[in-house]
Amino acid sequence: MSNERREKTRKKFGFDSEKEINREEKIKQKAQEQKKRRELKRQSIEQTTLYTVLIKGAIGFDIADAALGILEIGGDILSGVVGLLYVFLCINTIKSLRLTVAVLAVVLADLMIGLIPFAGTFIDMAFCSNYINRYMIKGFVEDDPAIKRRVNIIAGIGIFVIAGASFLLVKIISNL
């Protein structure tokens, strides 16, 4: 009986019981542990050579892609190879399917733009796919919620882009 009165008094005056205090402490500890794990994962990803090269070299890759785009096929080959490196980074190091699909969609869009004769070269100069991929990967690794929302949107669009590209590829092959 006295315990019920104590509980009522605690509730009335806003005092927490020991169970609630312990539960809140456990929740705080769990959140801190998760934050430490995310930080360790971020640091391990940022220390990889591939991450460093792709993040720091994104603008250079885009400039080389635009310069080699004049040769028509040269820029597309470079863009495809660097794009595959971004996809490999997402699959192997970051291990995120959403990010992989988003990066793959940007790479495919860049390749499709590069295949347009003459005009594709100029559009490709303005469409900096490596910089877009850098932006998404860096924000995703740094756990930026705004970038994660954009990655989700691009991944959703990317599914349709990949499906459309697959459909066109099957259609072209069947006509041969």
Image (cartoon, rainbow, N blue to C red):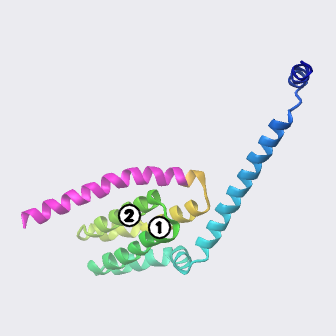
Is 170 positioned to the left or the right of 164 in the image? left
Give the CA separation, mark 2 to mark 1.
10 Å
Packing grade of label 2 (10 A; few <14, some 14-19, many >=20) is many
The answer to whether 97 is drawn above or below residue 48 in the figure is: above
Left or right: residue 71 versus residue 140 is left
Task: Say what secondary structure mark 1 lies in.
Answer: helix
- Tell me: residue 90, above or below residue 70: above
For image coordinates 19% across by 59% down, the residue present is 168
User: Considering only vertical position in the picture, is 18 above or below 174?
Assistant: above
In the image: residue 79, left or right of residue 31: left
Residue at 9% x, 62% y is 174
Q: Which amino acid type is marked by label 1?
A: Cys
Q: Is residue 41 left or right of residue 68?
A: right
- The part of the chain drawn in magenta is 148-176
Residue 19 falls in which quadrant of the image?
top right
Q: Where is residue 22 drawn, in percent x and y?
A: 81, 42
Provide residue 124's location: percent of width, then percent of height: 36, 68
Residue 152 located within the stretch drawn in magenta = yes
According to the image, label 1 marks what residue?
Answer: 90
Instruction: Name the residue rendered at 56%, 65% in the picture.
Output: 138
Could you tell me which quadrant the C terminus lies in?
A: bottom left
Q: Secondary structure at mark 2?
A: helix
Residue that carries the numbered disc 2 in the rendered image:
104
Magenta-drawn stretch, dominant element (helix, strand or loop): helix
Q: Position of residue 147 (x, y in %)?
A: 55, 55
In depth, the one of 57 and 86 nearer the eye is: 86
Q: Amino acid at mark 2?
A: Leu
Q: Is residue 119 magenta?
A: no
Front residue of 41/175: it is 41
Q: Nearer the viewer, mark 2 or mark 1?
A: 1
In terms of depth relative to the viewer, which is nearer, 44 or 65? Answer: 44
